[in-house]
């Protein structure tokens, strides 16, 4: 089934029994947790979800998503356009205890009251797909190469011996100010 916009809630067991395919978009500015992680976003995420039943009778969702996100550069904090995509395989479970029975290739997705919140699933996958670190190329970054190099105050200070933090106590002991005090 081709949709222009992915529905927010579905009945995944029925979709899996009919081996349905959902393809459409999710508007990125509706995803509040993504905004907390990566900043406010505009545009759409293209999503393909194929519901089915595997050879062992497990109901599953094979998915692919792709979006262009504006992520802040870690050096200059100016947003940088990044392509993010993810292929995922979800195993539907009705109880969290059943998650251990899924093979390692499947990520569990909890279906409550035979309903699944697809927007939450898609948002989770987008967040998991975020790159850990985003940088502009040095030539394009708003922070110059000179600003990226940490500077020391000079070798003369490094060669000076460190001050003893107990020097004050030693001076008091030598002057006799501490005599008789315990």
Image: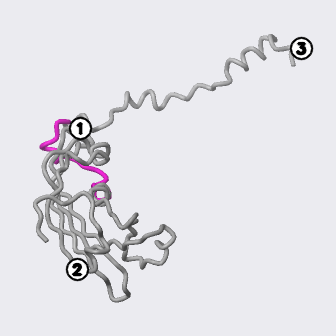
The residue carrying mark 1 is 77
- Check the image and report above or below for 163 versus 179: below
Alpha-carbon neighbours of circle 3 within 10 Å: few (<14), some, or many (≥20)? few
Q: Cβ–Cβ below 8 Å for labels 1 and 3?
A: no
**Highlighted magenta segment, given as a residue range:** 128-143
Query: Is label 1 in a helix, a strand or a loop?
Result: loop
| Comes first in the chain, label 2 or label 1 | 2
The 10 Å Cα crowd at callout 1, few under 14, some 14 to 19, many 20 or more, is some
Foreground mark, 2 or 1?
Answer: 2
Give the answer, above or below, for where 174 lies relative to 128: above
Instruction: Find residue 160 and report its horizontal and vertical position in percent.
Output: 50, 28
Lower position in the chain sequence, tag 2 or tag 3: 2
Sequence-wise first label, 1 or 3: 1
Q: Nearer the viewer, residue 45 or 117?
A: 117
Q: Quadrant of the N terminus?
A: bottom left
Q: Residue at x 46, y 31 (%)?
A: 158
| Residue for badge 3 | 180
């Amino acid at each position: 089934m081709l949709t222009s916009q992915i529905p927010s809630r579905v009945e995944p067991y029925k979709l899996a029994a009919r081996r349905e395919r959902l393809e459409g978009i999710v508007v990125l500015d509706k995803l509040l947790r993504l905004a907390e992680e990566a900043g406010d976003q505009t545009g759409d995420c293209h999503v393909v979800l194929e519901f089915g039943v595997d050879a062992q009778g497990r109901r599953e969702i094979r998915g692919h998503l792709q979006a262009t996100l504006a992520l802040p550069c870690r050096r200059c904090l100016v947003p940088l356009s990044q392509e993010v995509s993810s292929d995922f395989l979800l195993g539907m479970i009705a109880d969290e205890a059943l998650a251990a029975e899924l093979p390692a290739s499947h990520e569990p997705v909890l279906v409550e009251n035979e309903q699944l919140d697809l927007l939450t699933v898609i948002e989770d996958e987008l967040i998991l797909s975020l790159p850990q670190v985003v940088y502009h190329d040095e030539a394009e970054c708003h922070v110059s190469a000179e600003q990226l190099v940490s500077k020391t105050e000079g070798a003369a200070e490094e060669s000076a011996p460190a001050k003893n933090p107990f020097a004050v106590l030693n001076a008091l002991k030598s002057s006799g100010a501490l005599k008789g005090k315990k």
